[in-house]
Structures are given as structure tokens and as C-alpha cells.
Image (cartoon, grey):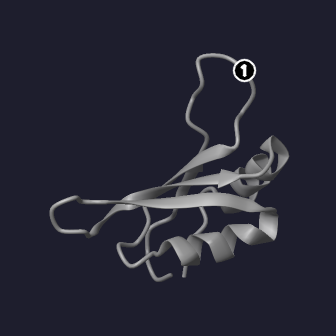
Amino acid sequence: LEHSAKASVAAPKPSEGPLGKKLYIGNLPFSATEQDLSNAFAECGTVESVKVITDRDTGRSKGFAFVEMSSDEEAAKVIADFNGATMD
């Protein structure tokens, strides 16, 4: 992935309970695909799902996605490893 800005990775803030497995991935290049994200985050564990959010009229990426990992621990590892990372 090519983009000069740093990616933002965070778990949505639950009103209660643990961190959670579903992560918000922000500040992505518009060229980022679900497969790109799945491949990148697979080094932290099993990727359950990836959804790049797109504009319903144009089909173009809105620059963010949601990634669900198979465990809270894997999700925490993604945050530790990728938050603030530049995705090339």
C-alpha cells in the first residue's frame, strides 16, 4: 500500500467489556483493498473478516475499514504493531 500518512488502528470504544476483536482501521490510501489488509494483519493472527468502507454512489474507498481478528489478544497485537504505521 502506498500512502504518506500514518494508519490509525483502534478498537471501537465499547460501553463496557473487553477490548474486542473488531478494529477500526483509518487513514488508509484509497487504493487499499480488503486483500491487502487481510495479508498485512495476518502476521498478527487469524483475520476473520475485512470490510473496506466505500462510497455507495462511486464505489471509491472512503479511506477506512473494519478488520475482525479471531481473538482479543490478536486484535491487541494488531493495535500494538500497526497503530501509527505507514502502510507502503
Q: Quadrant of the C terminus?
A: bottom right
Q: Nearer the viewer, residue 42 or 4?
A: 42
Residue at image coords 78%, 62%: 46
Residue at image coords 79%, 71%: 43
- Return the residue at label 1: 17
Quarter where residue 17 is shown: top right
What x and y, as percent, mark residue 59? 24, 68
Q: Residues within 10 Å of mark 1 (few under 14, many from 20)?
A: few
Task: Indicate whether 51 appears above or below 1.
Answer: above
Q: Is 53 left or right of 67, judged from the image as shown?
A: left
Q: Disc 1 marks which amino acid?
A: Gly
Quarter where residue 29 is shown: bottom left
Q: Nearer the viewer, residue 60 or 83?
A: 60
Task: Indicate whether 45 appears above or below 73.
Answer: below
Q: Can you see residue 26?
A: no
What x and y, as percent, mark residue 2? 46, 83
Residue at image coords 77%, 47%: 76
Task: Indicate whether 4 appears above or below 45.
Answer: below
Quarter where residue 31 is shown: bottom left
Q: Is 5 left or right of 58, judged from the image as shown?
A: right
What x and y, as percent, mark residue 78? 72, 56
What x and y, as percent, mark residue 39? 66, 76
